[in-house]
Amino acid sequence: MVPLNGSERFAGLDATVADFWRWAFSDLRNNTTRGILAEFLVARAVGDDGGPRAGWDSFDVQAPDETRIEVKCTAYLQSWAQKRLSNLSFGRLSGREFDEVSHQYGADVRYRADVFVFAVQTQREPNAYDVLDLAHWEFWVASVRAIRQQGLKTVGIGWVRQHATGPLPYAELADAIHAAAGTS
């Protein structure tokens, strides 16, 4: 697959791929889009430039040393009106692996990554929200061993604070991932 640059035009429509991206992905407060952004940030931190993201992959990012990384993201603020800040939790830590050859999911539920990165967009004031400011993010890193030992499917921020390395600023993320991969 060749990465798009955004200038490509639709046949039969006066629009570009960049127009679509603006329409579909401009709300970076949206859970799905913010999660993909967190995957992008982790990929950049570890130097994963293997090409466009594959949404069906068994893990989110692969470092050049082949460390498989699962990225989980949460935030206090959401794209909808809130009466209170969101509770911070991370789900779907395990799952069934997709087989590209058979185009089917395997029967076994398992942990498919070597390292988990728990990304938290920390802004609590809606008017100050800037998802592009990495100073408003915290990253926590845990080896799969720490999660597998307890058979966890979902964790809250309390578990993350107690068992993962962090909070880390973005500049320290790659080193923490490499350290956790060594303990997997």
Image: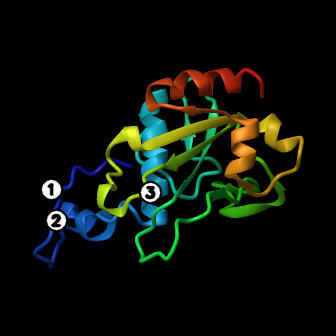
Q: Nearer the viewer, residue 99 or 63?
A: 63
Residue located beneath label 2 in the image: 16
Can see residue 70? yes
CA gap, disc 2 and disc 1: 6 Å
* Residue at left offset 43%, top offset 40%: 41
Quadrant of the image containing the C terminus: top right
Instruction: Check disc 3 and give the amino acid type.
Output: Arg
**Where is 155 relative to 47, above or below?**
below
The picture places residue 20, in percent across and down from the top left corner, at 25, 68
CA gap, disc 2 and disc 3: 35 Å
Proximity of marks 2 and 1: CB atoms separated by less than 8 Å: yes
Residue located beneath label 1 in the image: 7
Q: Which mark is residue 93?
A: none
If you read the primary sequence from the N terminus, does the residue marked by circle 2 or circle 1 appear first?
Answer: 1
Q: Secondary structure at mark 3?
A: loop
* Residue at left offset 49%, top offset 76%: 83
Horizontally, residue 168 falls left or right of residue 104, namely left
The picture places residue 59, in percent across and down from the top left corner, at 62, 47
If you read the primary sequence from the N terminus, does the residue marked by circle 3 or circle 1 appear first?
Answer: 1
